[in-house]
Every structure is written in C-alpha cells, then in structure tokens.
Image: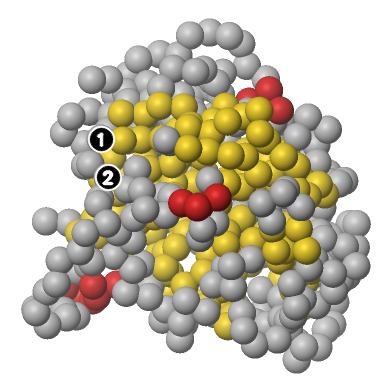
Amino acid sequence: MRYLILVMALVLGACGDVDVAPTTDAAPQVSTTTTAAEPAPVTSEAPTSTTDAPAPTTSSTTTTTQPLRSLDEITLSAVEAGSGFTQPVLLLTAPGDDAWYVVDQPGIVWVVVDGEAQPFLDINDLVTFRGERGLLGMAFPPDFVDNGLVYLNYINNQGDTVVASVEASDRRADRETLTEVLRVDQPASNHNGGMIEFGPDGNLWIGLGDGGGADDQFGQGQRADTLLGAMVRIAVDVEGGYTIPEGNLEEEVWAIGLRNPWRFTFDGDDLWIADVGQNRIEEVDVVDWTVGNPNFGWSEMEGSECFGGECDPAPFVLPVYEYPHSEGCSITGGFAYRGSAIPELAGHYFFSDYCAGWLRSVTRDGEMREWLPPRSLSAVIGFGKDAAGELYVLTQAGSVLAITEAG
C-alpha cells in the first residue's frame, strides 16, 4: 500500500500569529517521506498505511506478574503507525469500538479499521481551515452506544467557535443531522482552544482561549462573564440543547484564567491542561476538578511569573510543570498513560512542543522526564489514545506515531 503525504504549517498561538495561505488544487504527491512542504489542499482520498505499520491496539489487556521496573530501564521511541492525513489534531476511540477516529483539521474525521481509513464525517465546507482554525476537537459521550451522538468543536465560516452534535451509526456520521449546540464569537483568528471531552461527571467540557491577539488584548482572561479564556462545562441533551450543571463558577464557565488551552484531558478526577504561553513560559496545569473552581492566572500571570507588572500569585493555581522559551515555543498537550504495554508509565502525563520536538512526561507531583530529546519529533500538533490506553503523537506532516518501548 502507499502513503499520501500532505503537509502544512501551524503554530499553536505562541509568540506570534501565523496564518497558512490558501493553496492550489494540485494533486497530492505519493511519497514515503515526511519532509515539510507547502500546505496541500484537502482531498477526499483516504489516508493509507503500510502492511508492516503497527495495527491499532485492541482493548484487551494482559495481566503481568513481573515487578515494575525503574524508569531508568525504559527507553521510548515513536514508530510510524499511519500517514497520509492532512493535519491530524486528535486520535480517539468510541465506547465499545477499537477503531481509530482521526480528527483532521481541514474538516474531515477518518475512521481507521485494520489499517484502512474511510471518511467518518466530512464538513470541510463548513469549516474555516487557516492557521489555528479548523476542525479542532471531537468527543464521544459515555452513552454513545445508546444515543449515537458525536460532538465536534470547529471554527465556522464566520470565524466563530461552534460546538455541534451529529448522529452516527455503523462508523459513519450523518452530516444532515448536524445540530449546533453552542456558538462563541471569536474576536481574532488565534487562541481558539478547541479540545472537548466528556468529564467524569458526564458533562461536556470545552477549552476556550482568550480571544486571540496578544497580551490578552480583549481583557478576557480574568472575567467569569465571558466564555473566552475559560474552561466551559455544560450538560448536553439528545435534543441538541444544554443546561448548566451545578458547581460552575458562573453560567457555563467552570474556571477562568486560561490563555490558550489547546489540549486538555481527564485522568480520573485529575484535569490536565497544557496552556500555551505568550512569549516566555509554557505550562502544564493539573487540578482535582471536584474541588472548587480554580483560576489559572492568565493574564495576571504567565506560568509562575507575573505578567506585565507586579501581582499576587496567592489566588491562582500555579503550574505543576513549566518550561521557558529557550526550550520550545508552543506546548502541545497529550494524555495520561493508562495502557498495559508499559505499566511503569501509569499516570504519566505526556506532552511535546511544536518547535522543540522533544517528548516529555510529568507526574502529579511534578516529576518530569524527557523520553525523546529535542528534534526527535517534527512539529507535534496533537496526541492520540487508543482503546487500550496506548498513546500516539500526531505531526504536522500528517503522520501518526505510536509511542512504544524501544528494543
């Protein structure tokens, strides 16, 4: 079989704002390389994988009686497991289904079964795909098997954030059932956030940036009366609407003080957020979502430092881990590892940096380990997790890389 390598550029809202220019209708090139090129047009031709690429991990687990090893005995690698996507930002699975669902930023979701990709949903014509905009997130509710609903987060043709539901069955979504649940005006083209996930409470959580520009120019970061710069939490219903769950800070807003939470995830009651910094610090935050309504500090603070003047850090949640821009430019958050292949990594939250290309993890108590050195990975823009809890790295070059133990 073959790889269709389609590549483009994206910077996830670090120091500057980079827009990707429109491209021509040139046919995609067939190649087995992953070198960078100009942005390519999205096509309906399915990505493919080679027969010797790792197959999606199934949900079965193997019980081991071996004692856990020291982390110093473990070496990780990133092995190509799929390619030919345009700009994949998320890989996930549906409840009761081992297939990969790959969210491609131009507006297509692919379902990958036994190494073969087919369109699950195509809303390319409804999506603004440029720079940080596009189809940014997708989530399956816990009761997906019963109600068949899938939720999406995308930037529409007016430049606004839209959270919508769509009905799906037999690994195919019915675009005609697309129903808008929530729309948020975006005053600029960057800092859109985009991740959505159902939390342990069964509610839909939505990460939204501060509205874009720079320096929190719209003054959203410390306001609870706007959905921007916030972690939003709503209780969705099968009719396409939503209600406000108890325990929010104000209306839909659960927490404030975020700059651009491009990726977040739950691990039990822990909420992990990788918040993209301004021009000095990239940060990882973790909180117990059951305790209060945290304020993550932006734009009074960037990471653990005051931003633009003196501040009192006491009211704010400080990062569990942060790094300066001498080590990268824009954090890409992933997931906490809960697979069975490398049990020693249980609870480690994995993340990377778009510019630096290393792979790191951090634990709840702030212990960081670097698993792959700088420039090992090229332009990481997303992560994935399969039905068995094994993790994947998604790159600007359209590749899916499996995080595995080297050997």
Side of 366 where 300 appears, left or right: right
Residue lying farthest left?
66
Q: Secondary structure at mark 1?
A: loop
Whether 116 is drawn above or below 363: the answer is: above
Q: Is residue 284 visible?
A: no
Circle 1: residue type: Asp
Label 2 neighbourhood size at 10 Å, few (<14), some (14-19), many (20+)?
A: many
Side of 273 where 374 appears, left or right: left
Whether the residues at callouts 2 and 1 have beta carbons within 8 Å, the answer is yes
Which quarter of the figure has residue 400? top left
Residue at 42% from the left image edge and 35% from the top image edge: 170
Whether 17 is drawn above or below 253: the answer is: above
Label 1 neighbourhood size at 10 Å, few (<14), some (14-19), many (20+)?
A: few
The structure's colour scheme is secondary structure
Badge 2 or badge 1: first in the primary sequence: 2
Circle 2: residue type: Pro
Query: Image quadrant for the N terminus?
Result: top left
Side of 146 where 370 appears, left or right: left
Query: Image quadrant for the C terminus?
Result: bottom left
Residue underneath mark 1: 114
Residue lying farthest front?
146
**Residue 243 percent location from the top left of the image:** 78, 63
Which quarter of the figure has residue 246? bottom right
Residue at 21% from the left image edge and 59% from the top image edge: 60
Residue underneath mark 2: 56
Q: Secondary structure at mark 2?
A: loop
The Cα–Cα distance between marks 2 and 1, rounded to whole angstroms, is 7 Å
Which quarter of the figure has residue 71? bottom left
